[in-house]
Image (spheres, rainbow, N blue to C red):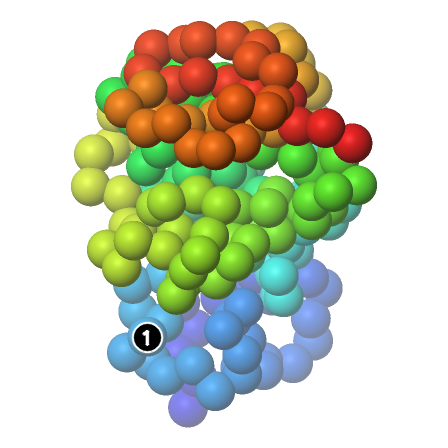
Amino acid sequence: MVRLTLPLILALALAGCEAIAPLRTADGPSASSTAEAPREPRDASRAVAPAIALDGPLTLASLALPLSSATAVALDPAGRAPLDDPISCLARTLYWEAKGEGERGMRAVAHVVANRVASPRFPDTYCGVVTAGGQEGPCQFSWWCDGRPDEVVEAAPFATAREISREVLNGTSKDPTDGATFFHNRSVSPSWSRVFPRTARIGAHIFYRGRG
């Protein structure tokens, strides 16, 4: 027997459903109850936000723009949601790549991702850019393939990262990197840094604009 929880009732009401059917997650129809349990708050948030799809991977095109702060929080309230929407992918990148760099440093990294999405040389989605290369490496963003857990552990910097991500996705954030598509920590010197034009130095990172 299906248990009628409040999130399920709200989801069915919003979708205009007349029959009760098993809810399918982005992980597929065979997700176990054990795997689904930690995501219940996220599903509940989706149920009360009609602009967010209730089923399947989320893309920027599937979300209603401009994204509100409430919608951004609903997508990834604690930095533990699956990486299947642009807010989660972008905010998690800012958190792990630049959480010690403050708001300006996070914003700079966000625009590197956005600039890559806009470039024909890179994948055309935020999650595609962030996860390029796979978790086994080599990858484009070190947090994605360093073998460590990807879940957020500090709420305050993640909240900042999520809000910056929302502004970038809405097109209301000014790019402090002047179109950069690459960056690195000042402690390293990759070979491409001697070829690409430098555009900015923000905190511990140096930014570059790729060619083509």
Q: Give the quadrant of residue 159.
A: top left
Relative vertical location of residue 208 with respect to residue 117 in this rendering, above or below: above
Classify residue 192 as left or right of residue 116: left
Relative vertical location of residue 96 with respect to residue 39 in this rendering, above or below: above
Instruction: Kindly identify which residue carries mark 1.
Output: 35
Classify residue 212 as left or right of residue 125: right
Give the x, y percent position of residue 7.
Answer: 45, 60
Relative vertical location of residue 206 with respect to residue 140 in this rendering, above or below: above
Looking at the image, can residue 71 be seen? yes
Relative vertical location of residue 96 with respect to residue 59 in this rendering, above or below: above
- Judge the density around disc 1: few (<14), some (14-19), many (≥20) Cα neighbours within 10 Å: few
Question: Which of 31/180 is in front?
Answer: 180
The residue at the point 29 percent across, 53 percent down is: 146
The residue at the point 32 percent across, 75 percent down is: 35
Could you tell me which quadrant the N terminus lies in? bottom left
Classify residue 139 as left or right of residue 149: right
Q: Residue furthest bottom?
A: 1
Question: Which of 22/35 is in front?
Answer: 35
Give the x, y percent position of residue 60.
Answer: 69, 43
The residue at the point 42 percent across, 38 percent down is: 93
Q: How many marks?
A: 1
The amino acid type, in three-letter code, at marker 1 is: Ala
Looking at the image, can residue 74 be seen? no
